Amino acid sequence: MKILSSFFHAFNAVCNRQIGRGTWLSQCGMCRVSSDSKFQPGFGLLFDIDGVLVRGRTPIPAAKKAFQRLVNPQGQFVVPVVFVTNAGNVLRQTKANQLSHLLGVPISQDQVMMSHSPLRMFKKYHEKCVLVSGQGPVLDIAKNLGFVKVVSIDMVREAFPLLDMVDHNRRPKLLPSPIVNLPKIEAVILFGEPIRWETNLQLIIDILLTNGNLSSAHQNQMFPHLPVLACNMDLMWMAEAQSPRFGHGTFLVCMESIYKKITGEKLKYEALMGKPSELTYHYAEYLIREQAAQRGWRTPITSLYAIGDNLMTDIYGANMYNCYLKQRTSRKSSKAVAKVAAGTISSTALPQEEDMDNVWESELALPSATSCKSVLVCTGVYNPHTEVPRDTNQAIKETVFHGHRDFHFDPALVEPDHIVQDVDAAVELIFEREKFLIQ
């Protein structure tokens, strides 16, 4: 059973840490490992992109230096790395190609997690007709995630040209041609901030108030409304400009306010994805485990480090996931040890439903990580314009909550475990903490 396997792996990992991450023990109590085995990391790195590695399309100088530490002469990563971005306007392969070019190291799409990546798990919607909002190749992105029947905002405009009336220059000059038939929309998926906010806000509200039947009039009592799944809750993000720019979270604030103003009801989400969502970090940890397995690293990944520039997404999310891991460990450890001691678990047994905290764990398997540490860099949204505080506990005591409406604000969750100047300093710090020596 996975719990039994994790128990022995965790025991082995503790032994390994006594001599650092650079080598394996030749013999450790219950197990024996060859002394000439290659070093195997027991930690993984989760990198934000905007404000940490790049500013717009310009690499941050420290990024290339950092990745020289992370890649061996053969071009292979020496530790499992996943790039966790709240962007959702491109395919994973496209983002991987961009990062490879900007950082000068080979990066595969399996190392990239977009804000919409967890949608692969929402299989109950894959056969339904869904409206997608955002920019970039949204139809291709949706189909790549497993959705079969996809409708874009542009397709809605073509089918119902009288619905988009804010821009006078785009209003139809003649009576519209016969309406193009569209299937009934059954769910709304928001990938990221669109180009024309007014058009997207109007048509999304139309769809919610007509229950997906745009040929009918608004029904303000249409509640509960169609399922809405939103990716990327960033209120702001950092590009080349001196100050942060509006993100998809700002678009969501507008949509929520309009819906509330019209109906008097609170717009509800079927799911919120992207940092700081716990689901996002759970999926990222799954990708870390998959990467380690593909490299043949047998040491379980027990520590995660999330490196970001935004207190309300990167730091808040990492700290929230760390709380989840700690709570899960405390709940599971006593039960697992008791079962092992009683001899009631066999190595071939399957996990029982009681061992699953939620449906995502059953989809992705139980996490092996027991901690997720947050590391804040000063090259993006958070830039104090002062020296890096020596005492991180005193660094941030009060802040305005820019997180999403549906996330409870806990001041402790915006306190990073570490504050460093840039991503290179972050990698150096992590290697020192893990006693990870590249041989």
Image (cartoon, rainbow, N blue to C red):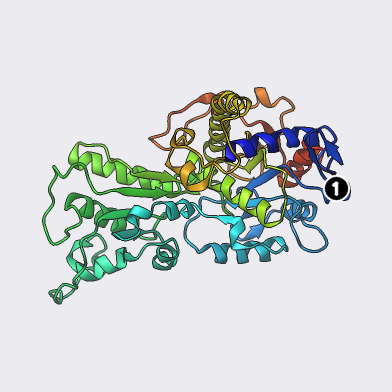
Q: Residue at x 45, y 65 (%)?
A: 144
Mark 1: amino acid: Ser
Q: Position of residue 340 (x, y in %)?
A: 62, 29
Q: Position of residue 435 (x, y in %)?
A: 82, 38
Q: Residue at x 33, y 43 (%)?
A: 269
155 lies above or below 333? below
Q: Residue at x 38, y 49 (%)?
A: 230
Q: Is residue 41 left or right of residue 290?
A: right
Of 3 and 312, nearer the camera is 3
Residue annotated with mark 1: 34
Of 325 and 62, nearer the camera is 325
Give the structural element (helix, strand or loop) at label 1: loop
Q: Quadrant of residue 217?
A: bottom left
6 lies above or below 174? above
355 lies above or below 163? above
Q: Residue at x 31, y 48 (%)?
A: 228
Of 408 and 292, nearer the camera is 292
Could you tell me if residue 104 is visible in this image?
Answer: yes
Q: Quadrant of residue 299?
A: top right
Mark 1 Cα within 10 Å, few/some/many (few <14, many 20+)?
few
Q: Quadrant of residue 97?
A: bottom right
Could you tell me if residue 234 is visible in this image?
Answer: no
The quarter of the picture where the N terminus appears is top right
Q: Is residue 252 left or right of residue 38?
A: left
Q: Is residue 263 left or right of residue 419?
A: left
Q: Position of residue 119 (x, y in %)?
A: 43, 53
Q: Position of residue 70 (x, y in %)?
A: 76, 52
